[in-house]
Structure formats: C-alpha cells, structure tokens
Image: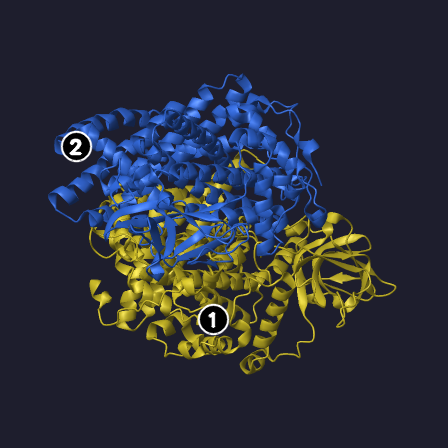
Chain colours: A blue, B yellow
Amino acid sequence: MLLSSMDQIQSSSFARYLDGEFWEIKDAFRDAISECELFQSSSYELTLDQSRDLTAERLYHLLRLPFMKEHLRNQELQFTGMFAMTERGHGSNVRGIITEARYNQSTQEFIIHTPSEDAQKMYIGNAMKGHYAAVFAQLIINGESQGPHCFIVPIRDQNGVMWPGVTTTDMKHKEGLHGVDNGILIFNNVRIPRENLLRKFGSVSADGLYSSPVLSKSSRFNAMLAALTPTRLGLTVQAMAAMKLGLVIAVRYSHSRRQFGPKDQDEVKIIEHQTQYLRLMPHLAAALALIFTTRYAAGLMDDALCQGQDLQSNRALQALVAGLKAYSTWENVACLQDCRECTGGMGYMMENRIPSLKCDSDVFVTFEGDNMVMLQVVVRELLTQYTKLMGNNLVMGLIRNWTSSVSDSLRTSFLGFNVDKVGDLMFLLKAVSYRERVLQRSLASRLYTKVEKNKDEFFMAWNACLHHVTTLAMAHIHRVTLEQFALAVRECHIKEDRALLTKFCLLHGTSLVYQERAWYLEHNYLTPNTSQQIRSQLLELCRSVKDDALKVVDDFNIPSCCIQAPIAGVPNPRAEWAFYPQPQYPSSTQPLSKL
Amino acid sequence: MLLSSMDQIQSSSFARYLDGEFWEIKDAFRDAISECELFQSSSYELTLDQSRDLTAERLYHLLRLPFMKEHLRNQELQFTGMFAMTERGHGSNVRGIITEARYNQSTQEFIIHTPSEDAQKMYIGNAMKGHYAAVFAQLIINGESQGPHCFIVPIRDQNGVMWPGVTTTDMKHKEGLHGVDNGILIFNNVRIPRENLLRKFGSVSADGLYSSPVLSKSSRFNAMLAALTPTRLGLTVQAMAAMKLGLVIAVRYSHSRRQFGPKDQDEVKIIEHQTQYLRLMPHLAAALALIFTTRYAAGLMDDALCQGQDLQSNRALQALVAGLKAYSTWENVACLQDCRECTGGMGYMMENRIPSLKCDSDVFVTFEGDNMVMLQVVVRELLTQYTKLMGNNLVMGLIRNWTSSVSDSLRTSFLGFNVDKVGDLMFLLKAVSYRERVLQRSLASRLYTKVEKNKDEFFMAWNACLHHVTTLAMAHIHRVTLEQFALAVRECHIKEDRALLTKFCLLHGTSLVYQERAWYLEHNYLTPNTSQQIRSQLLELCRSVKDDALKVVDDFNIPSCCIQAPIAGVPNPRAEWAFYPQPQYPSSTQPLSKL
C-alpha cells in the first residue's frame, strides 16, 4: 500500500517554516520512506529476529539512497559497529567503569579484559550483529590507570565468526525497540593492536609512554563524554518525532470522534470537551517549542564543529543539550500518555500506533544519560557560570546578588499585580527567567553554606539539594524553550503563520508558568488573583487553538506510512473497524480571525 | 521453578493488617498460585493464541480449587460469557447505544440486531471463545423504545459453532492484556426467546406488554449502570496489585543497586538519592491509602448487598467507587512510570516485569468507564447531595454557605499561619476537606449562574466548568483516601505497626497538600512560608520512610512467581545478568526509633 501520492501534496508555508532550512532533504526522506515497501506496514507482529532484520534492511535502504551517498560519502556498508560504554556495575556513573585495557609492550598490543561481572558491557545495541565495538576501558600502562579511553575492538568477522576471547549474550525482550538487539559483551584477554586506541585524548607510544593533550584525568574524561552530545541531541529529535506522531493521531481522532452533547442535538467532537483540549494543546505547544529549540542547539553544534572546536570546550552547549534531552524525553512520555488516554480504547489497540510509540520511546528518559543525571549536568554548568560571574568572592557575590534579587522581586511583583500584563509574552518570558535566576542564586547559597561553612562532604551536600538541583535545571530549560519559541515567532515573516505561532507560543509560556504557579505564589511573583488568571488564560488559549491544531499536525508533514493509525485517517485492511476519515482543516472559515 | 516454600514464611502482624479480615483466603490463593506450574513463568514470549489459552487455563485452575468451589458453589464451568455493552459509536456515552432488541409477539422472541456499523459491540472480552453474551440493547415493542435493557444472547455452542446471525471479529493486538481476546460482535436479526431478557429492571409479557419497577427511562438506565459498580471496584483492586508489584521491584532494586557516592568511598544505594526516594515513597504511601479506602468501599458494598439493597439506591457508594476507580488507575500509571524510570535500563527489560505491568494496566484508566467520565459521576453525586442540603432555595443556600465559607477561611487561615501545625495529621485532614468544600461550593455557584441566571444550555455550562468538575472530584477522593488511612492508623492496635502507618499516613497527606499547594496559596490557606514548609516536610518524610519501605513491600506478601523480576531478588535462569539478591530489612536496627 504505497501512499506516496497522498504525501506529495505541496507543503504550506507553515510546514516549510517548521522544517527549516533543510526542508528539501527532509522531503526527500519522506518521499523515500513513502515509496519503499519496507516502511509500509507495522512490525509489531514480527518475532524479535524478524524485527531486527527489518530494522537493518530499513537502515541499509536509507543509507544507500542516492542523496545519502552524496551527503555522507558512504562506504560499502560492509561493517557495522557498536558503542560499548555502559557496564553492569556502572550505567549512570560511567566514570567508574572497570573494563581494562592493559598495554603489552612486547607485542605492542592492548589486552582488553572484563575482570568481573560488574565490568560486563551491557545494553550494547547491535551486539548480536555488529563487527566492531568502540569500547570504553581503563587504559593501564605498567599497572597505572590513565582513566577511561576508547578502543576499537573486533567482535566478529563478516561470516559471524567471533573474535578470540569475545563473548556476546542476547538480552532479548524489552518493553519496545524490538528492532534493536541489545546485548552483553564479555572480553577474556582480547588482544588488539596498539593502533586501535582512539588517540584524540591520549596515545601510547610503542615503548609504552603515555601522552595526552588534556592534562588531568578528570578533564580527559569530560572531553570523552562530550562525544555523547550529538547523540543526545539526536535523541531529542527522536522524542520530538514520537510526540508529533502521537499528536497527529490524537488530534485527528479528537476532531473525528463524537461523544456526548447538548440534549436532543448531535453529539460533539471530543476535542470540544474542555478536559480534552486542556490535555492535548499544551503538548502541541511544547512540541513546537522543541522544534525551534532543537534547531537552535543544532545550529550551535554545527557552528562549533565547523569552526573545528572540540565540543568539550563548549560546556554551555553540552549543558543545553543535556537539559533538552531530559525535557524533551519526559515531555514525550507525558504527551504520549495523554494521547493514549485521550484516544480511549482505540488508542490501546496496536493498529493505532500509540502503544508502540510509547513502548519504544519510554527508555529515552534513561539512555544516553539518565534524565536525573542530565539535569545535574545542566546545573553543574549553571553554577560554574555563576561562580565565574561572582569571581572568587562568592560571599560578596551572594550579597550583591541578593540586593538585585530584592529589587528584581519588587519590580516584577509590580508586573504580578498588573493584571493586564499576564497575557503578555514579555510577562511570561520575564517570569520564567526570574524563576531560573532565583533558583540558581538560592541553590548557590545553600551549597555554599553546606560545603564552605558547615564543611559538609560535597556529595552529601549536593544530594541534600538534589530536588532543588533538578528543579533549577528544568526551570533553565523551560526558559530556553520559551525564548527560542519567541524568537522563532519574531523571525516568521508570513503574517498568518506568525499569528498562529504567536498563539501557541503564548500557550507554551502560560502552560510553563501555570505548572509552577505554586512557586510564583510562594515568591509573591503571582498574586492569588493573577494565578487564577493564568489558569483562565490557559483554558482560553487551549480552547482557541483546538481547531488550528489540525493544521499544525498536518503541517508536521509526516508520511501516512509512518502514521499508520486508522483513527487518524490512514486506511488499514487489517483494522477496518478502526477507520475514521481524516478530518479536514476548515480553510474556508478563518480560525485566525479569533486572534 | 516452584518457590512456594519461600512464600510460606509466617506473615508479620503488619502484613496481616494490610490483608485485613480475609487474610486466610488470600493466603490460600497465594499458596495455590505458588504451587501451580501455570503461574511459574512469564508469558511475554507467547503468541496471542498461546497467551489467551494460558489465561483460560489459569482461570479454570483457580476456579476449580477446593476452596473456590466451596465459596462460589461452582458449576462445571461448561460455559463462559461476555459482557457486551460498549458499541463502536458509544463507549463512554453508553446511553446512546443503538443495538436493537425488537419483540416479536407471534414467536415470543426478541430479535437482536445491529442496525449500523456504529452499533457493533466492540472491545468485548472473551468474544472469540465465550458461549453467551450479556448484550445491552434498546428494547423495542411495537416500534417504541423502552431504553437499554440486558439480554442473554447465545454466541456459539460448545463445539464453537456460531449461533445463527452472530458474527465475531478478533480485534487482535493491544498494548497489553494479550491473554484477553477482545472482539467485535455483530447481530443479524438474531432470535432469542422472551425469557432471555434479564428482568430486574423491566419485563415483557407474552402479549407484548412492558412493565418495570422503575418508572422513568432515565432511572432505569442508571439502575442498570449500577451493576458496573462491583466491576469498577475490582479494577481498583487490580490497579493496586499492579502498583504493589511495581513498588516491590523498584524499592528492592533501589536498596540493592549502588551508583555514585562521596569521593573515595563506596557508592551509595540509589534509594539514598534524594530524587529517588522523593519519586517512590509518595506512591508507596498512596498504595497503602488505597488498600484501606478500597476495603472501606468493599465493606459498604457488602453491607448494601447483604441488606438486599439494590446498588442503584446507594448513589453515594457508586460515586465513591467511580472516584476510587479513577484515582487508583491514574495513580497506578504514574507509579509504574516512576518505577520504570527509577529502575533505569533494568526496568526496561521484559524479564524485570515492569514493562508488562505498565502495558497491561495502562487501559484501566479507560475501561469500565473512562476516568474523565468517572470524575463526572462523582461530581454529579456531590452536587446532588449539595442541592439536597441546600433545599430548594439554592440562592439562599449559596449565600448562607458563603458566610460559613468566609469564617471557615478565617479559621483555617489561622491554621495556615500557625507554622507548628503543618506536620499535624489533623491539619492535613482539615486542609483536604476544606479544599473539597470550597471547590464544591464554587462549582455549584458557577453552574447556578450559568444555567439558572444566564440560561446557558446545561451541557455547555457543564463543559465550560469541566476542569473545575474534575478538580473537585479528585479533591473529593483525595479527602476520602486520607480519612480512611487516618482511621486505619487509629484502629491499628500494635504499637510498632501503628507507628509505621502513622509515618506513611502523614506522608500521604503531605503529598496530597503539596501537589495542590498552588490552590492553597491562591486561597490563602497556606502562606508562602507554610507552603515551603510543606515541601521540606515532604522531603523529610520520604527520607524517613525509605528504609521502612523494604518492610512494607515485603509485607505485601506477593508470591515470588508473581514478582518474577531478577532485580527484585527472584532468580531467573533466562536473565542471570539481571539478578540482584533480595535486600534484607534490617530488623536488628530500629528504624522506627527515628519517629
């Protein structure tokens, strides 16, 4: 069932704006996916092996597309690899990994070894098929460790024959991601040539002398972790994709399905129920905010890489991406759960796609860095910035800052009392920014007291503030998403599109402030009155965009073969009972006039 | 792998208290399950057909147990049935079902018919195997409908031969509950004898005269819906079971797994991380609250049934159960999500049980009445009570009530300012009760204004208040759970157990008030100071119960074969890599002394 003809409708200006400058290659991918048989059906009925094979076939198909070859100068795809960092004993705390790479000078080899059960490499994707692994291990020369480094270790040859000393175990069934084979790697004194150490952060001469451009072990480790930054940003893109898919399905069904209504009249579309639009619309606004924020982060990363910067020198970018990863993946989990519930029994059926989206993306909050750890990465960077700002005299800094905090509070509480301003984007931007600033200041002050004054052990002091830490990190990323959304509104030059984005941007900001209204009340930034007004505003904004939502999800431009769900208007002969025709966005009426 | 010997350890007094008066039959079930091969392995690798067969075998095994035969006086289990209410066009709004049951006087039969696609009975459990269906259809005599009634319709005989005119379609794959075959029933002029109308709420004489003990169609419909009350309570029990299972796994793993720690010292157990205990402990407190609240509701239901009352006359009980269904199933979804995330990658592996728990119980928020509808059932009852209380003069009532509201607010805001009292259970009980009362009063007033003064159409007025409605319903059920928990504490006569329950009860109340602290601040019930104190109190209570949590989850007395998860200390040869020995509750130390 090839539906590409349906998908090749001319995109709207809004859709182009959402796609950004790379819309052409995105369209090429959409066409390629829509035209290829491999992407035409769901895979939930397959066995594990079949799922894994299908994933590989899909991947090879995409990598062999003409425009991919051109862009990536692709090899013949003879070999595939895997990334082997996590160990049984150390997932989040990778610094503690214990796989060993001992240098053997006589043979000029490294001996890769798993000294204990806790050292087994775990959850390694492609472990059952891949040929080479990038293995993180403690580099040991003459009995002394130089900290974790990365080594290329052969796992199996093209005929599947295992490299001597390597064992793999299939971890088999997971909640989702059935197409990925996660497994365990065990190394029993595996010999690899000296050249297989990736030398960016440290190298070993033939006669066993270690040298590194990065002096301290700690800095070296951080530099290596910076390599995870692009992957984390990729995960944010995946979380966004899952959210968008879920929203297409839930919004379309909500505009098709009718239930309850005024006495003796037709039942209303379920999107008309206040709780339904209140549950779905803030997620749609967040999805839009994420589109622009991710593009911003990707731009920074491109710039850094084009200027030949090492990512590790750009700690602010690392922190931004870590925060974005945490926010986007949690927002995705919450969004898909609401999509599931808002589509009722239909949303529970596999044919309608939402269950597998949920199961596949659930682990995003965990992998490539557990979200709780990501938030701590964000705050470490925020506090570093803060300390720099304050100079060495942290106490004076705190006092100086405290003064500005008081005037800040006075100035902003004026805004708080000024009822007319609550609906203003500037009010919302100031609010999220104020919150971040105050949380940052108070955290710095608490940590200072614990560590410097009370001489508490640092981990204990940090842990006693962990709720504060994670709250600050979320406040930070909230602020960034709202700012980037606001910038994207300003830079949009088509009037109708800008009007539409403005509503969703206001909604996103209102939703962020509403979620944290308790904090604003505690800090007298909102009065009880303005807080209640924020709630009314949230309800009203959600109501006002519920019809526009149809246009927005259509403009995500997701190919029908990816949507799959019959309740979203994609016919499926296996589930005719689930089919609802795709609701049409009423272009004749002018929903924008409501603005 | 029969683990019954492990499970037959003498239960503690705390475990007995959690089980309540029926602990003996619960123990008998636990033993029966632990001793039976059918329950010894997980079922996620089975095909749909195998899963369904296994479910049937398990069910038959349990129903044939000696003590079940004795209690249920069981038949030979020749026939199984199904409950056919939901239609394609009407799920939540069952009043609108359109399946027809026309009386044919000449043959003294009913003709059961599906007049359109929207009339197809959908999501019917056991549709592919069952022999009889309890079908809800519009009873039509001489072209006039008497509203929905329930009919027994043969579906297939013992050899699987379909009854003439009946068609079933398999809906196949769902997110979970693979052992249940949900299907579609279509009736093409199916003839059944007159006696197959269930006559409790209406009967038809041979010559086609309709009579009913319930006069209005609307009351009759409500009476029929009351039959769902016990099933809904059963669903609450299932949601609790899923929560308890998730918590056993997450709490044990959190006490086994170590990650991060003070410099140059052992890593700490992950339960020591502030965010970890803050995420898990409130769910454990809620699970305990649900145990006692469910028992309270079950007691009321038993009393009603023993006194021969029809459940429909006990609308307060219906509302309580509807609210409990919504609260428990949402709390379960949130709890399992946190259990999944707090167990990291391990929690994503099927062998560790949490994924299938999530997928199976996700739909609980939808079926047996969508939670959003359940909350509206609660509020309809609350408003009915309110109107009765006010008499006919609603306006005078509102004014009178408003006065008492003001004094209430004054009295309670005194409490709000009195910092010492925040940690007191009485303060928390008063807070949740005050919130419910104010929300109820303000909703009544808003609806009165819209409907009586502004003459808004009722559905539209109600829908404009829907967020308020659902907020009130949750406030109501929150209050009930805290009250029932507090009563259970008072009635517990073993000192140590009462001390333990007291901590968790305080935690539950603190967590409820913390969640809604914005509302309390808006209503000046909490000051900014006391609100921040509530947060500190929440953190401190969670910290103080994190070790007790091990005892509590052990005292849920769940058989190992149900826990399954290797990370919770249950060995599994298929996933040795996931095994963590069961952490022991340190009975030698005296964690209760911290009180």
Q: Position of residue B433 (x, y in %)?
A: 37, 52
Q: Is residue B205 above or below residue A505?
A: below
Mark 2 or mark 1, whichever is nearer to me: 1
Q: Which numbered dot is residue A398?
A: 2
Residue at position x 48%, y 24% from top? A502
Answer with left or right where residue A306 lies relative to residue B460.
Answer: left
Look at the numbered disc 2 and give the secondary structure of its residue: helix
Q: Position of residue A319 (x, y in %)?
A: 33, 35
Look at the numbered disc 1 and give the secondary structure of its residue: helix
Residue in front for this viewpoint, A486 or A227:
A227
Q: In this rendering, does residue B62 appear at all?
A: yes
Residue A445's image quarter? top left
Marks 2, 1 in one chain: no
Q: Position of residue B572 (x, y in %)?
A: 45, 68
Residue in front for this viewpoint, B167 or A109:
A109
Residue at position x 51%, y 51% from top? A157
Q: Which numbered dot is residue B505?
A: none
Residue A412's image quarter? top left
For mark 1, what is the residue? B561
Q: Which class describes the residues within 10 Å of circle 2: few (<14), some (14-19), or many (20+)?
A: some
Q: In this rendering, does residue A552 appear at all?
A: no
Answer with left or right where residue A251 lies relative to residue A509.
Answer: right
Q: Name the amino acid type tagged 2.
A: Leu
Q: Chain of mark 2?
A: A
Q: Chain of mark 1?
A: B
